[in-house]
Image (cartoon, helix red, strand yellow):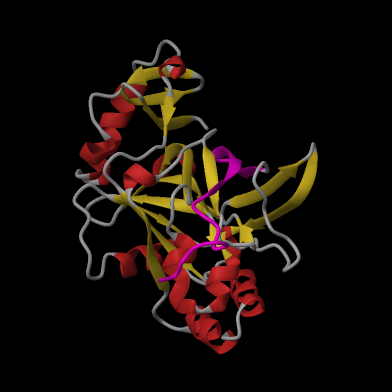
């Protein structure tokens, strides 16, 4: 990563070629500006890099930004949804239709970052990570940068009924972002290779790679739909869907480690924990 933005416990910083400099702006400040102006701010800071600021602690690379996500943007994702549910025609329509599936994923305070723990629901027995490219969009809908995202999902809950999607997708520790934001002018337009690895008991339990060139929709199209009737004064992060869905006999477990990587964007690493309560013994009233 030749240049990247990091959220430290003491504020925001720019890293270039291993050297660091503090930013006098928050991410919300930068995303309230046109991209051209924000680029000048970032590059001015990058011209003054010196020491290593990582000792101050790394936080998820968001401050006031909501996280939204797009679904069924790869053929493999469509096929996976068909496997887990009895509603195959529904996902065929989403994959080929004009309007994409876009849903709310996380409030900024609920996001976890690199080296933090991600969650699987205690009341779900079939859970997977979803490795995705995240678009960091400014208030005007312009592409400011990219990050990596993990849209943790309960396949058992979503597969039971598509209307359960919010419960399958939105819960504590269900969204990981990081390790940093790479500006769009530094990363280039793509396509991007993205990989996923699940480590268990010292070995690989699952590994896969894909490319954003396999997406059925463009980044620009997804961003335009998100902004069609919504405003984001502090910017927003849009996860763009996954092209890697494990077979039906695989589930992540508490204690696993998930790695998501992209050559241009780095590696996002998270250990898995269980969150919430199991349904056993719960009184439904």
Q: Residue at x 71, y 54 (%)?
A: 208
* Residue at position x 54%, y 60% in the image: 153
Residue in the image at 60% along x and 69% along y: 156
Query: Residue 21 lies in what quarter of the image?
Result: top left
Q: Is residue 142 left or right of residue 171?
A: left
Task: Name the residue nearer the viewer: 243 or 143.
Answer: 243
Q: Which part of the image, by quadrant, shows the C terminus?
A: bottom left
Above or below for 82 versus 137: below
Q: Is residue 58 visible?
A: yes
Residue ranking furthest to the bottom:
89
| Residue 265 visible in the picture | no
Q: Position of residue 222 (x, y in %)?
A: 39, 66
42 sits left or right of 146 in the view: left
* Occupied quadrant, residue 53: top left
Give the residues in magenta. 257-285
Residue at 53 percent of width and 44 percent of height: 118
| 129 is higher (above) or lower (below) than 269 | below
Residue 283 magenta: yes
User: How many callouts does the rendering have?
Assistant: 0
Q: Report x, y in % for residue 72.
A: 53, 71
- How far from the left and from the top, in percent, is residue 272? 60, 44
Q: Nearer the viewer, residue 246 or 48?
A: 246
- Of residues 70 and 200, the one nearer the viewer is 200
């Amino acid at each position: 990563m030749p240049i990247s933005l990091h959220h430290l416990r003491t504020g925001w910083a720019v890293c270039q070629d291993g050297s660091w400099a503090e930013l006098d702006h928050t991410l919300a400040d930068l995303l309230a500006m046109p991209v051209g102006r924000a680029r000048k701010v970032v590059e001015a800071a990058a011209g003054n890099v010196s020491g290593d600021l990582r000792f101050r602690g790394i936080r998820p690379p968001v401050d006031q930004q909501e996280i939204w996500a797009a679904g069924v943007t790869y053929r493999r994702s469509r096929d996976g949804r068909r496997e887990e549910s009895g509603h195959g025609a529904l996902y065929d329509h989403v994959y080929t239709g004009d309007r994409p599936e876009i849903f709310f994923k996380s409030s900024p305070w609920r996001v976890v970052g690199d080296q933090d723990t991600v969650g699987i629901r205690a009341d779900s027995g079939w859970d997977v990570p979803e490795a995705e490219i995240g678009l960091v969009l400014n208030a005007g809908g312009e592409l400011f940068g990219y990050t990596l995202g993990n849209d943790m999902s309960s396949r058992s809950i979503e597969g039971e009924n598509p209307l359960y999607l919010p419960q399958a997708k939105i819960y504590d520790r269900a969204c990981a972002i990081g390790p940093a934001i790479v500006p769009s002018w530094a990363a280039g337009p793509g396509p991007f290779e993205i990989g996923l690895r699940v480590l268990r008991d010292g070995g690989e339990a699952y590994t896969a790679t894909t490319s954003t060139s396999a997406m059925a929709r463009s980044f620009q199209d997804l961003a335009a739909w998100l902004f069609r009737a919504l405003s984001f004064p502090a910017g927003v992060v849009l996860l763009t869907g996954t092209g890697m869905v494990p077979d039906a006999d695989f589930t992540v477990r508490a204690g696993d480690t998930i790695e998501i990587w992209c050559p241009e964007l780095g590696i996002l690493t998270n250990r898995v924990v269980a969150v919430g309560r199991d349904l056993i013994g719960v009184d439904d009233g």
